[in-house]
Image (cartoon, grey):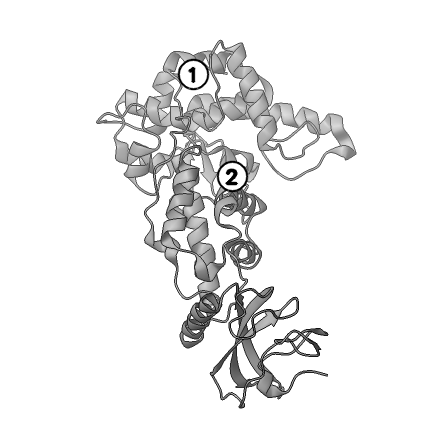
Amino acid sequence: MGLPESAGIQADGPQYGPHGGSSAGNVVPMPTRRGWGQDAISFEHAEPCRDPGRHRSCAGRWRGIISLGYGPDGKRRRRKVSGPTKTVVQERLKQLHDDIDAGVRAKPGYTVRKAADDWLKDAMNGRDAKTISKNEYVLAPLLVELGSTKLRDLSAGAVSDALAAMARTYSTAAVSMAHSALTRAITHAQARDLASRNVSALITTPKGQRGRPSKSLTRVQAAALLAVSSGTMRAYITLCLTTGIRTEEARALTWQHVDFGDPDASPPRPASVAVWRSVRATGDTKTEKSRRTLALPRLAAGALRAHRERQDKDRATAGQDWQDNGLVFTTRRGKPIDASNVRKQFKVACRAAGIEGTWTPRELRHSFVSLLSEHGTLVEEIARLAGHSSTRTTEVVYRQELRPVLTTGAEAMDKLFTTTP
């Protein structure tokens, strides 16, 4: 049987009363019934009471409670806090009143980690698994510092300190992404009335460590790479290097989006590739401007023709085991190639070409931008060919060597690479 309403809170079982005797209750009874929004503060004993007046030497904890009237089910609604001293409880009751006035419904124990988990589960639902995993990865260092902090107690200073600690070992990009994820997680909590303000939004992201800068192949290195590559990777490397399409776009490319052209048509129809898809979860390209149709340099068109002939032979050899999905780049049984296999084969090709250092397939796109710039192509035209949303991306992210220019795309590549496959 619970305590009378005037007692303020209900007991969980026989405990020591306020005056040292064993009792069904564990608080000092209130003399009158509290009204809506009124507070009750009492001491909950863990052992017999030693100080009935102030409980300074008593083992136990101070409890505070606010009555919020009755809910739709007829049950009385209460919000509770606790603390080691009466002063702490009074402060927490005051904060609880502020939260109630602001419409915040979060329980006192709602932590930053719980807010991050809720955001990843709810707001990120339906997003690509790689996107969710990336956000989990960048949030991890911050949650080490802030995860156990109650969201209501989170301060701008604590967020700033956690970001500064992360910046000492992580790249600027990772720190920026982590800060953004934390801000969005708290915003998600705000939208659910679980936070009153977003202290993360008040902080400026610190600069982290410099990551490995992207590199660009020189013309000599590019020619050497094309000379030693063979099979599927020759077509893959040639296409990415001479058109600048992203590796995620190349892996999603289908034969129906490759047009080998018709020089005898009136007017002649050039060979082209329609970049309309990617391997992203939605199948869309990165941006709207990434959807583009590019003329194929003769070198790329020749490499793709040879590749299609090889694929036709692979299809005949595989027979019923062939997985027909219409993709340009596949395994010998028609299955899609994954990014890890492309990276491995690309490293093998770079070593065979005598190109030192660590290189990744995405740097073929950087090389495309730099080689066009070296040839004198306008940065605006390079941005359009690469599908960049603005020339700033071309200049800041992909810039290796940019100069004012006159000509573009397929014509430039035909002059750079005159060798036929």
Q: Position of residue 115 (x, y in %)?
A: 52, 58
Amino acid type at mark 2: His
Q: Is residue 289 above or below residue 192?
A: above
Residue at left 51%, top 39%? 257
The residue most toward the top is 354
Q: Is residue 14 left or right of residue 191?
A: right
Q: Is residue 63 above or below residue 70?
A: above
The residue pinned by badge 2 equals: 257
Residue at left 48%, top 69%? 86
* Whole-number angstrom distance, CA of label 1 to CA of label 2: 26 Å
Q: Nearer the viewer, residue 390 or 66?
A: 66
Q: Position of residue 284 (x, y in %)?
A: 49, 47
The residue pinned by badge 1 equals: 222
Q: Nearer the viewer, residue 114 or 214?
A: 114
**Quadrant into which the N terminus falls:** bottom right
Q: Residue 298 sits in which quadrant?
A: top left
